[in-house]
Image (spheres, rainbow, N blue to C red):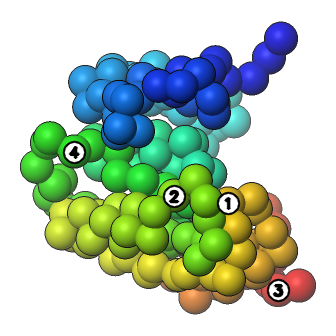
């Protein structure tokens, strides 16, 4: 069967990295998972003939990996969208030299995340120099139309910095 392996401390949830019994991540394991993703992104960009204007987007554990990619390889992206993230690293210092805009979206009623998870992720990236907008929506863990509106609004407002993330669609692509 496809999909992410079950790698939680309790066997629940989907992640491509290990969790400790307290739910935190193994920093070394998360870091080790970044290199194959960088290779896949590089390959994909070469396949489509585009190596710029890439926005990384991740949801839940995917947002953890997207945050890790932003921290370790910010040169690959012009922006980032993190839906329901947790900080990817606990024992390493905050990154430095980040300049890209990042949107962090939390759900106020999210039972899978603590209220601090998104705020800590946003602050860690902000300390590294990223231009972070942190939004808390009145939703749970799942992706909703409110998320879509928040992301499209953010893309519209940051399109000068995330210029032509979708160049074939033109500047009005964000209007719905």
Of labels 2 and 4, the one closer to you: 2
Q: Residue at x 40, y 62 (%)?
A: 117
Label 3 crowd (10 A; few <14 / some 14-19 / many >=20)? few
Q: Nearer the viewer, mark 1 or mark 3?
A: 1
User: Going from the N terminus, do you reach mark 3 or mark 4 first?
Assistant: 4
Could you tell me residue 130's position as x and y percent?
A: 30, 69
Q: Which secondary structure lies at badge 2? A: loop
Residue hosting label 3: 175
Q: Residues within 10 Å of mark 4 (few under 14, many from 20)?
A: few
- Report the residue at 59% width, 77% height from top: 108
Locate residue 112, reporting x and y percent. 58, 53
Q: Secondary structure at mark 4?
A: loop
Q: Position of residue 63 (x, y in %)?
A: 52, 50
Q: In which quadrant will I find the N terminus?
A: top right
Measure how far apart labels 1 and 4 are at the Cα level: 22 Å
> Can residue 155 be seen in the rendering of this structure?
no
- Distance (Cα) linking label 3 and label 4: 38 Å
Name above or below for residue 140 compared with residue 18: below
Q: Furthest-left residue in view?
A: 93
Which residue has dot 4 on it? 90
Of callouts 1 and 3, the N-terminal one: 1
Q: Tell me the CA gap for discs 2 and 3.
A: 31 Å
The residue indicated by pointer 1 is 141
Kindly tell me whether residue 129 is visible in this rendering.
Answer: yes
Q: Which residue is outermost to the right?
A: 176
**Considering the numbered disc 1 on the image, is that residue within a helix, a strand or a loop?**
loop
């Amino acid at each position: 069967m496809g999909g992410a392996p079950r790698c939680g401390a309790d066997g629940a949830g989907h992640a491509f990295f290990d969790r400790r019994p307290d739910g935190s991540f193994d920093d070394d394991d998360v870091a080790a998972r970044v290199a194959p993703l960088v290779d896949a992104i590089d390959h994909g960009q070469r396949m489509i003939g585009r190596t710029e204007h890439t926005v990384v987007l991740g949801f839940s554990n995917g947002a953890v990996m997207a945050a890790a990619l932003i921290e370790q390889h910010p040169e690959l992206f012009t922006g980032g969208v993190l839906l329901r993230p947790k900080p990817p690293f606990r024992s390493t210092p905050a990154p430095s030299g980040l300049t890209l805009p990042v949107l962090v979206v939390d759900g106020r009623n999210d039972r899978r995340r603590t209220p601090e998870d998104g705020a800590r992720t946003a602050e860690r990236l902000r300390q590294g120099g990223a231009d972070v907008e942190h939004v808390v929506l009145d939703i749970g863990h799942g992706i909703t139309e409110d998320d879509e509106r928040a992301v499209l609004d953010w893309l519209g407002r940051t399109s000068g910095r995330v210029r032509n993330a979708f160049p074939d669609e033109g500047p009005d692509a964000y209007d719905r």
